[in-house]
Amino acid sequence: MQSKLGKPVGLLNVNKETPKFSISLHSPSDDLTHFIEHYWVVRWDLRGQEPHLQENLPHPSVHLVFEKDNSRIVGVVKGRFSVLLREQGAVFGVKFRPGAFYPILKNPVLSITNRTVPFHTAFGMGSQSLEQQLFAQETAEQMIPHAEFFLRKRLPEPDIHIDFINTIIQCVISDRSIVKVEDIVNRFSIPTRQLQLLFRQYVGISPKWIIQRFRLHEAVEKMNHEDIPDWSKLALDLGYYDQAHFIKDFKSIIGKSPEEYTKLNKS
């Protein structure tokens, strides 16, 4: 039984006054939650308007992206990325849990990091038939059963490594005292090399990247919805040793300082 979820995390420079697109998140059926984090649907209608460039922060997940005549598998993107929205359109996405695409791909997920690959790379077939079924529907609730029928026939047996990886990631998200890979190693009693290999193979990205991105996700969400004059306090709240390290990380990924981003976002 699917349900509608909350707001997405990682959208940059969102204009709350005049939104250029709508996005909704939907949970998978219970029997698919080992592999699927959620489904997402983006719709836009910019006919008669300028195209909109939407910038985003990445997540440590592989996505199936269904778009008319352009469906694909999208690996983890290391840095900030942009999507240009023109005219009118819709995209349906399947967001896999971190690590959950490895048993499907059967190759290290690192091999598709920062890459978009054809649908048949993992599924041995094209996407046209499923794409047509999805976009013949009017709502996300009508689309999801078609996607789930397809996935149920092709998902492998559960893999215990997926749950272990997601336990680590949830710990990183919830515990701000985890600021470096050594903290994960100590918390979970796993050798550093084994941890690094596990994440390269299953997630396609390093544990260090995971820590940094989720801290930046939290920072951006606060800046998008709150007034934050005290950058030093924010840096400490996010687990940084000092404001300088936070600003350096933020600017290297977002392309602007926290103050510049906030001013632009409030304008």
Image (spheres, rainbow, N blue to C red):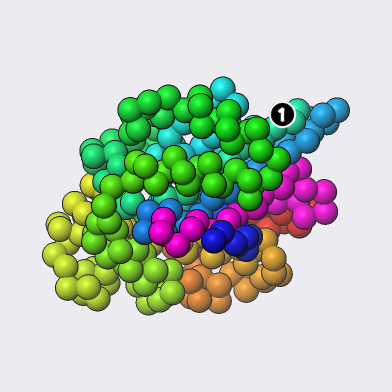
The foreground one among 237 and 205 is 205
Q: Magenta stretch: give its range.
A: 14-32
Can residue 258 be seen from the camera position used here? no
Residue 150 image point, x, y percent: 44, 40
What is the secondary structure assignment of the residue under circle 1?
A: loop
The foreground one among 151 and 218 is 151
Residue 46 image point, x, y percent: 79, 33
In the rendered image, the quadrant that contains the N terminus is: bottom right
Q: Residue drawn at (56%, 64%), measured in percent from left and top? A: 219
Can residue 39 be seen from the camera position used here? yes
**Is residue 15 rendered magenta in the image?**
yes
Residue of label 1: 86
Q: Is residue 200 left or right of residue 117?
A: left
What amino acid is labelled 1 in the image? Arg
The foreground one among 77 and 165 is 165
Q: Residue drawn at (71%, 47%), measured in percent from left and top? A: 22
Residue 64 in the image: above or below residue 166: above
Q: Residue drawn at (21%, 69%), measured in percent from left and top? A: 185
Residue 154 image point, x, y percent: 34, 41
**Is residue 252 rendered magenta in the image?**
no
Residue 133 image point, x, y percent: 58, 33
